[in-house]
Amino acid sequence: MRQTAQTIPQAVLKAACDEARKLGLRTLVHANYDAVHGAITAGCTQVEHGLGATEADLRAMAEKGIYFDPQAGQLIQNYLDNRARYAGTPFFPKTPQEFEPMKELLPITHGVVQRAHKISSLKIVFGTDALAGMHGHNVEDLFNRVVECGIAPMDALVSANSLAAEAMKMDDQIGALAPGLEADIIALDGDPLKDITVVRRVAFVMKGGSVYKNEMHLVPRSRSLPKLLDDRRSCYLQVDRGGMANRPSVARLPSPYTRGANSVRWRGDCQAGEYKLHPLEHHLTISGRMLNELRRLRGMLLDESFAA
Ligand SMILES: [Zn+2]
């Protein structure tokens, strides 16, 4: 993934884009640095990544109506988080330690998103490269767009909904709430325009008119606990399905200020509950119908004994 040179000859790339266009198909070219210019001049419909895209590249994409799908850091973070698995595979460093310089790409990715957003007519969609290890964490890049890159929450949300649907030529089916479209709806536990972290707290999912998840009744009314835990910037609280008839073994819950472990599952009477420590955030997942437990837990977390 560190390759910067164009790997497909320009004539081949152009032929592929031409043939696809004749067939009414889209062409998405994963391109960085010089290859961005190659993809644009070949007439592709969408550029993925775009690391090292120049101002001229970004403007050319806007002028030609080419969709742009830059990542805002999670792609790199995913490699870093999963370095032990990626190490030694083709195109990747041989050892986990050798992944360290990849961190330098994080501000570069943020910079691409920021520069792209300065060009108002550029159609910037949301995509994650569908990396191994990424699934289930895709929304982190939406978060990154807002928090790391300073993009307006509404722009980030539109990039992943109506604009993404338009880019896929599926805007007559998905991407908006309108008569005749698929009834694909999610509900978040809060207002993402005010607090983008709520995109991680999906409380309701309807796909094609069928409800796949409905935890609206489990969403705690109080925002106190997440705020309490938010000693950094992005603690969130998620309430999952599952039983929690018994009292949780709160004593085993590590302090929100504890560092070092990646994930601590707390045991005892309650089956579920996972407290993950991530470099940038705290994830506290509590399962079950337990508003009273949450209040009790909050009391205990306030206790000095839970501070490191
Ligand atoms: Zn790619």
Image: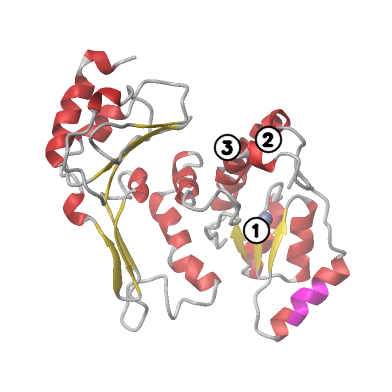
Residue that carries the numbered disc 1 in the rendered image: 48
Look at the magenta stretch and give its main secondary structure: helix
- Placement of 182 over or under 143, stated as above or below: below
Residue drawn where x is 47% and y is 42% of the image:
150
The numbered mark, 1 or 2, whose residue comes first in the sequence reads: 1
> In the figure, is residue 304 to the left or right of 164?
left
Q: Amino acid at mark 2?
A: Met
Who is closer to the viewer here, 155 or 280? Answer: 280
> Which quadrant of the picture is home to ligand 1?
bottom right
Q: Which color mode does the image show?
A: secondary structure
Residue that numbered label 2 is attached to: 102
Which dot marks residue 81?
3
Mark 1 close to ligand 1, CB under 8 Å: yes
Residue 60 appears at what percent x and percent y?
Answer: 69, 62
For the residue pair 141 and 83, the one nearer the viewer reads as: 83
* Disc 1 to disc 3: CB gap under 8 Å: no
Query: Mark 1 or mark 3, which is nearer to you?
Result: 3
Task: Say which element carries label 3.
Answer: helix
Element marked by disc 1: strand
The kind of residue on which mark 3 rests is: Asp
Q: Does residue 111 show up magenta in the picture?
A: no
Q: Are marks 2 and 3 in contact (CB under 8 Å)?
A: no
| Callout 1 touching callout 2 (CB < 8 Å) | no
Magenta stretch in the rendered image = 14-19
In the rendering, at what x and y percent does residue 176 appear? 37, 71
